[in-house]
Structures are given as structure tokens and as C-alpha cells.
Amino acid sequence: MSEPAQPAGHEPRQATGGQPRDAALEGIDIRKSYGGVVALDDATFRAAPGEVHALVGENGAGKSTMIKALAGVIRPDEGQIRIRGEDVRLRSPEHALRRGVATVFQELTLLPRMTVAENLLIGREPRGHGRIIRRLEMPDVAAQLLAEHGVESVDAGELVENLALAQQQLVEIVGAVMREPSVLILDEPTSALARREVEWLFGLVRRLRDQGTCVVFTSHRWSEVTDLADRVTVFRNGTDVGTQEQISEEEAVRLMTGRQVSTAYVEPEEEPEREVVLEARELSASGLHGVSLSLHAGEVLGIGGLEGQGQRELFHALYGLAPADGEIEIRGERKRLHNPREAIAAGIAFIPQDRKAEGLLLPMSVRDNLTLPILRRVAASGVLRPAAERGAAREMIDRLHIDARRPGQPVGTLSGGNQQKVLLGRWLLADSHILLLYDVTRGVDVATKQDIYSLILDLAREGRAILFYSSDTEEIAHLCHRVLVLREGAIAQELQGEISSEEIIGASFREETHA
Amino acid sequence: MLERAEPLRGLGRSAGWVAARRQQIAAQNAPLVVAGALLVAMLVIYIVLYSVSLGSFPGAFEAASITNHAMPLCLAALGQTLVILTRGIDLSIGGMMDVSNSLAALKLHGGFGVEALWTVLILLIGAGGGLLNGVLVAFGRLQPILVTLGTFSIFQGVALWILPSPGGHVAGGYTNFFLDPKAPSALVWVVILGLAWAVLRRSRLGVNIYAIGNDENAARANSVPVLRTKVLAYALAGLLAAGAGIALATTTTGGDATAGDVFTLSSIAAVVVGGVSLFGGRGSGVGALCGAFVLTLLVDVLFFANIDPLFQPFYQGLFLVVAVGASTLLGRHLVRRR
Amino acid sequence: MSATTESQPAPSGLRTILNPDRRKIIYGFVAAIGLFIIGEIVKPGFASASGIQQILEISSFVGIVAAGQTFVILVGGIDLSVPWVLNAAAIVLISQSAGSNGKLAIGIVLALVLGLACGIVNGLGIVLLGIPAVVMTLGMNGIVEGLSLGVTHGLSCGGCLKPAPTALVNAMTGKTLGIDTSLLIWIGIIIVVSFVLSFTTFGRRIYAVGNSERVSFLAGVNVKLVTVTLYALSGLFAAAAGIALAGFGGSATLGMGDPYLFQSIAAVVIGGTYILGGRGHYLGTVAGAIVLTTLISVLLAKSAPDYARDIVYGVVILAILLLYGRQRSEA
């Protein structure tokens, strides 16, 4: 293992406690509470230089809080952070960066209306006479930086807001890596990345590790954890419950949840063909080329394919979010969907991935969020009927086991998993019989994912029709009766029966095959 | 580890790349280009109407008149630009112009020394007022529109206290130096303002201002000193507003403690016509200068088109709405075509 | 950086009923009462029954304009066209009713239609053309100002200088059931507006849109319709205030609407409505309007010079903001 880079003036101290290796980054006996809620309870995390260390756990287990403490975003109530064996009190992420700890969070810190170059070079722009920034040179300098890190697909002169989310994430990662940190923390780094970019990231991480950098990352995707991590630390209930080099998914889930949870998917039952609830013919829009599909009651129809092949456009077209040529028929009736209102009236519901920005009104109450599309039903001539509203809300809260002390509490105070349930509850309340689920399990922890899977299959059994897209191919493979694989905006292949994720991935790359 | 990074050396450039980059920059600065086009169009219309009306082309005198007339709005718009770029807004610019207008009319005569001293003092007062705004917005974490609404009122009151009724004058020598009524020397000032903007844009402070307007949290994460930058932006706006008030006093026959009021909203109009985004982080001060000239020329255009002056606000309002509406529609159209 | 995904403790029952928004409304009324007390100390009789009524009556004009302003601010907008829509409505009323009680009804209707039309145009410009509210309503103000001045030749046309019909004047300056009629009208407006905000589906949609246009849109709310309606209402209320003021003052004058821009916005802010939308209530605005008017009256009672009023206005706004206007950090 190579020596980690030593900043001038900092003598490394031997980490105390007889640790097997010198630690690059440590959080020792960290305690952190928010109000009355304990987020970290004597949690300890140690990462060594020259290793890739995964931090896993359910949402609410404390791993994000730990990451924030290590990154300098929050200050622990008690406990000690050490960088290369030296005690530090981190005041801010910038302070942590100066001590060699760079963090890439899911929320990007890019400046959207400025170019990639301006973003990467901020604070270290090329200067000319009189210390004036040479703006014309900047894209070239930045392009070279990107190339040095293996990123060729991003135009350094382009505005960040014009980049796809995945490209933005690449820029963010390069921005952190180019500071040559001794510790790189990546919080859910692959959430927006497609396969090719994930491979690039893995390569980058391995290179950094081989150079002696310590890389810490969190992920909900088990395959990534096994592929990439040298060691895994599991968090549960605000503290660390185990650090191992080899750990199976079952073992990890057991540690994460404290109980045996089956990680096997619940497979859908084989249903005979039921009535066609939604028929789309030759749907075409920007990014969509003549997609036709039939969706049956009781069916979970998966939409597979590489990221950005038209899945989002398809969902948007079916919900009235984008104008599309072609025909849509709901229960045999021809419909033109110009906006979500018309889609909702036709019985369609859309559940997006980003529940905070697109799903819920965080400061408003659970009750208000649940009844938003069906206000007319709980009102008489425009005047709300509180009793009817309360009843409707109570019905959903009970049915979905939403953990909210009172229906009047702001939905922003609920945990992520419960927020997702409120979102689903809204559409169940609206009696939507066609559900468009777009990547609803992204960023959701294992246990809640299981709940959602069961819920989806229950809903299908009830006779609802579900269109399901997920960035996790395993999910699509296991949950769906059928899968349509999209490639460049058109259907490349239809898969039925026992579907494997390999089949889906294969179809994503191949030309259209005739079954 | 990397606190003071070595600025990265630039590469050698090939002609093809430079051309492609320039094209990209032009596309990214479309609103500025539009503002420039509007200015040219407005100039052409003005010249045409003038010559049709009076049978001769406008000359140095007219150029001087227009430039001098536009100066107050130019300065006010520039100040407003700085604030709007940080995703704020400064409603107190008109009020600060009232204060400096009043002070200028009272004090700007009596020889070079006195006039120079008072010029500096007035500018400092402007910066001080802006500083108040900046501190309240940055450290008080209050909404800019409301803070500056409050300080607008305060400054108006102070101006009325300084100059309860219109009067005073600015020394002739002072006027002739800065805003010569006979020759368009003020164009030099405009050019200087443009250059100053270009320098600011390429400075640490300029980058910080744009960064904050883009996304404050992201800016902070990129080590931008958010508080300090905001305070500076508002302070500079106050300083420019004070300058605008002096310019106003110089071009009019006397001081008036309410003459600056209307500039709050017209500075916003100039900024918007100039292509600066009200959401922050995008736009150029040069655009604001174009916008100021466009709006000033509009008044003259209306005059030569024999529009009843009472109808002026109608055309100004209509112009503002149409200009912004058209540019928004154009922007949307361009995005769709990509 | 990111909002915590962990659960936060739900506020207890009492704290929800007395949530920060409602508390601000209460503070507003407390402040108004406090000012009345100060006024009484400065000039005995200030807070007598008739004194209070007088101040409430004057507040009513701000309050009516501020009703419209509250609506648009709740969805994150603003209406800068209030001054001249008010003025133009007053001019239309005066000139169309031409001093005669018989034509009063038509005068009122036309004035209200004018306000409605201006508001609708504002709303359409904002939602269809994407023009920012500041720009659109600012432009509209100029447009209406220009039209008013131009068409009436600077308010010197014959019809504009007539007095308001006596029926209107009597209504606005007289009493009904022992209370000033204009105050009764305002109370009626308060009841209706508050009811709409708190208890109707339209009101719920207003708050939804104010919190997030995107989420509301995806949940089937007709965001464009809601927005245009609110600007239309703002225009309507501005026109109503113009009619009321024409009756109260007996005529239409130039610039009569100018003070109401600042005052309407200030009233909304003092009342605790969040300038970015989604939080607040008209009851708070009512308190804000009363606080503002009482403040001026106290100052007038102390024979403070004109400029002092402006300075105090500003200081009060800043003080209120510092007290409870703190921007929440990005959640």
C-alpha cells in the first residue's frame, strides 16, 4: 500500500487503540441529536488510506448523519473526528476540504447557469494581466482537466443546466477529485449514473485507492457494494453494528434491520390476460419514436433499457406532460391528454422519483397532501367538509401504515419512506386505476423497498394496471409480468415469463430482435 | 491542502476551437445580443423620426442631450444589475437617488475642492445606505424586496428632511465637466462604465456575485464568501445610486427630493430590457446600459412621433411588457428547437 | 446540506394550532392594540370608540387593496399595478356616473370591470408569456397611467371633474346600524376572503400553488387558472378601493392610488404572509393594515413632520422583518 500524501506541517499521530492500520478518517463515539431524536449514538467509523470502504444501512440508521459529520457539514454533539490520526473540529465542508476530505453529495453543488469550466475552475481561474480572469481560455483548461480524469462526454463550455443529470454528476465528481483529497467521500454516487458512467466511476475509485486515497461511499445497491468495497461497515439505529471485509447481502440486511428479512423478490403471480386498460399506439415525441403498448388490468408492465432511452418521455406522454403524436385509449375510449388534470380524470396517476420537488408539498399537512387531487370529493360546492377530509386521510393512513402522529402534521416531518407512502396514498385515494411508477425506489432503504414491492403487487392483484420503471434492472426483472425494453425511443424487445436482468440488459444493447 | 491553488496555465489555442467557443459564448449571451439589437433598432428609429420631423440629422448636441439624459438611469441600472445578479432586488435605489440629488443640489458649488469633497461624501453616503441594505439582507437573512422597501421609505424621508422643497443647483463648471450639455463627452463615461463592468466580471468579486445568484448553497460549498459578497453588491449599488442622483441633479435645473423615486422601477425596467435575469446569476451590466439607453431613446422617439406626452407611460409600460414577453417567448422557442 | 430524511418530532397539538403563521397574526393585532394605547397616551381620545372607528375606516382602504395583494403574494407573485388601476377605476366611476345617482350602478360596474380586466391581462401575461410578475404589473401600471392621463387629458376633461354621486358619498361617509358603512363593507370583505382562504377548495389550491407550482401541477391543480384568477381579484380589489375612495373623498384626483402600493405590500408583510408564497392569511394583512394606519395617526397626533412619517414607515417595516421575517435557510 502506498503512503498517503502528507500535507506540510501536520505530523501524523499514531491512532490510539491499537487499530490494525493507520486510519485516514475516523469518527469516534459520535453522538448527534436533532431535537429529541437521536441520530447517532456512540457511532464509530474508521476508514484506512488506500481502501474503498462502504457504509451501508437503512434510511434513518445514521449513515447520512455520520457522513455529514465526517464531511464537516454538521458538528457532532460528542465524539471525535480524526483526519490522519489528528483530532479536528470541522467547521464547514470547505474546512474539511482544506484538511483533505472531499465529499460529493447527492445534492449537487454546481452553479447551473454557469459553464462547466466556470464551475470546475472557480477559485483557481486562469489569470492574465492585472489578475483579470481569462474567460476565453477557461473551457480549454477545463476540458483538459476532464480528459485527465477520463471524462470525454462533457462539453466544458456548456452551461451546467443544459447537461443531463448524469453528466452533472460526473462534473461534480471530477470537481472533487481534482482537489487531490486524501479522503474522498461519495454519498450515493451512482444514483443518476448509467452503466457506462458507473464503470468509469468504479475505475476512478480503484485508481484513487491504488494511489493511496481513502474512498468512502454509501449505496443502496448491493451489487455495487460487493463489486467495489474492500470493507463494509453496517449502521443500524444510529450506531455501527459491524465492519467486515466479506459480507453477504443476507448478512448485511440482517445487520441493518436486526431481523431476517427476505431479500428475495416477491414474484408476481401469473395472471391470465385481463382487459386492456390502456392502449398506446405509435406514441411519438421528442425522444420517443412510435411506441405502442397495451397495459392490462392486474398487470405490472416494466419499462427497461439504458438510462435516457425514452422511458421518461414515455411516462410524460402518458401523463399529459409532453405533447405526443399517436393515440392513447383508456378502456377503449380515445383520450387526448394535454395536461396532468386530464390524465388524472382518466384515472392515471404519476408517481415521480423526486418526491420533494415533484410529489409532495412539504410544509403542508399529511392530510392536505393526501386530498390534493380529490378536493372536489371532500367538498360541497367548493366548500371543504372537514369531516370528509379527515375520514379520507385516516383511511389512507391506516391502510398504508403511515407513521404520522397526527394527520395535521407537516409532511416534511415524516421520514423518507413514509413520505413515499403518503404520495402513494394520494393516488389510491384518487382511485387511480393506472399507476405510472417512475423510479420510486431510488434512494429508498431495503426494508421500505420491500414494503413498496408488496404494495405494488397488492395493487396489481386488486386489478390496477401498473407501468413500472426503475433504474435498478433487478427490480424490473423480478417485479414485472412483462418488460418492454426501450432503445433510442423505440421498443427494442418485449420479454415475458421468467425474466432475468441479463436479458433486459442484453436487449438494451442489441438491435430489435423479432421474437 | 489546496487552499491557494496555483492558477492553471492556459493551453495554446487553435483557430477552429476559438471560433467554436466564440459561437457558444454568443449563444449563451443571447439576451445581451438582443439588448444590443434593440439599442441599434431604437437608434435607427430615432434618427429616422428626427430627420423626418426636423429635416436634418441629429448631431453632437442631440447626442450629448441623450447621453446626459441617460446617465442617471445608466448608473442606477448598473447598481440594480449587481443586486439582481445576486438574486436580490433593490427598491431603495430611487430613494438613495433622492438623497444624493438633494445633497448635490445643496452642496455641489463653491469651487473645485468643495465640489470634489462633497462628491466623495455623497458617494460614501450612498455606499453606506447600500451597506445597510446588504447587512440586513445578508446577515439578517431578510428578503431583499422587503428590506429595500423599508429603506426606500427611510431614504425618501431623509431626502425630504435634507431638501424640503425643490431648490439648489449644481455648479456650472461641475456640470460642464461631467455632463457637458454641448458635446457628448459623457459617452466617455459610458465607455468607462462598460470597461469597469468588464473588469468586474473578470474579477473574484464578479465571479462570486454570479455564483451566489446561481445557487447560494452551491456557491458557499465552492468557498464563495456569500455574506461578504452580498454586502459588497448592495453597497456598490448604493454607491452607484448616489452617483445617479448626482447625475440627475447635474442634468436638471435644481434639486428635488422626489425626483429619484421613479428610478427604482425604471432601473428594473432597464435591467430587464438589457437581458439580465430577475432570477439572478445571468446577464450583463453592459446589457443594462443598453437597456438604459433604449428606454431613454424611447422617450425621444415618442416625442418625435408626436405622441401626446401624457401617453408616455402607456408606451413605456407597453414597451416593457412587449420586450420582455417577446424575449421570453423567443427563449422558449430556442430551447424547444435544441 | 440535504434535509434530514430521518423523522422529526411532530409538533404537539397546541403548537400546531398556534403555529408560527397564526402567531404572527396574533402579534399583529397585539401590536395594533399597543399602538392604540400609545396613541391614547399621546392624545387622549385617540382610542375612544369614535377614534378607533375612524382609524379602522381609514385602514379599510388599505385593507381592501391589500386583500388583492395578499392573494397574489400567497402564490409568490406581486401586483405593482395597484396605484393606477385604483386611480383609473375612480376616474371611470366619476366620469361614467357623472354626478348622478341613477348612473351610479353603471359607474360601479364599469369601474370593477376595468379592474378585473387589468388583473386578467396581468395574469395572462404572467402565465402565458412567462413575464415575471414584477415586470408585468409594473408595465401594466404604466399602461393604465398613460391611458388614464392621455384619455382624460391630465384629468381635465369635463366628466372627470364631476363630484361623486351623493349616494356613494353618503354610503362611504355615513353609518349603517351605528357603524361606518365603509367599515362594514370591509368587514364583509374580511369575512369572505378569510373564508375563501381557509375553507374552500379554491383556497386550498392557492396554498398548494404557493408552496410549489410544480407539485400542484402534477397533482392536477390548474395552476394557470388559479394564478390568473388571483391577479384578476387583485385588480378587482384595487378598483373597489378606487370606488370607495372616490366616494369617501368625493372626487377622483391624480395620484390618489400612489400611497397604496407601499402600504398594501407593507400590510401583507406585517401580517406575516411569506413574500415567496405558500404561507400567510388575510387576517394577518388586516392586522397589518390597522397597524400601519394607527402608526401614521399616532405620528400625526404628535405633529410629526412629513418626512418623519416616511422614515418611521421604513423603520417599522425593518423592525417587523427583523422580528419575524427571517428567511428560512434552504430546507
Image: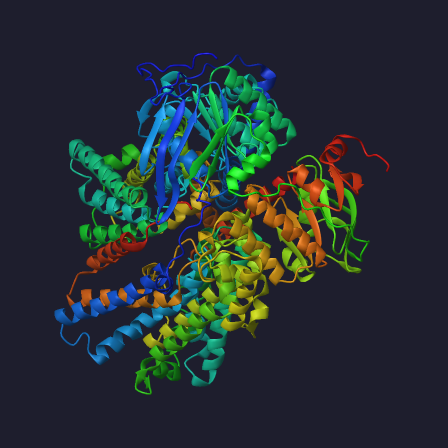
| Residue occupying image coordinates x 58% and y 32% | A248
Residue farthest along the front direction in this orientation = A260
Q: Which colour style is shown?
A: rainbow
* Identity of the residue drawn at 55% across and 20% down: A206
In this view of the protein, can residue A163 be seen by the observer?
Answer: no
Image quadrant for the C terminus of chain A? top right
Total count of labels: 0
Q: Nearer the viewer, residue C75 or B167?
A: C75
Question: Is A137 situated above or below A192?
Answer: above
Q: Residue at x 35, y 23 (%)?
A: A17
Task: Tell me: residue A317, above or below residue B186.
Answer: below
In the displayed orientation, state which residue is furthest to the bottom. C177
Is residue A232 visible in the rendered image? The answer is yes
Question: Residue C229, how many percent across, how many down?
Answer: 52, 64
Left or right of A495? Residue B252 is left
Relative depth, front residue between B219 and B2: B2
- Give how far across and how far down residue A462 sits, in percent: 70, 59
Q: Indicate left or right for A302 with C9 as reference.
A: right
Tell me residue B80's x, y (percent).
37, 42
Left or right, residue A462 beside residue C250: right
Please determine whether, in this image, residue C269 is positioned above or below residue B141: below
At which x and y percent is residue A63?
Answer: 45, 37
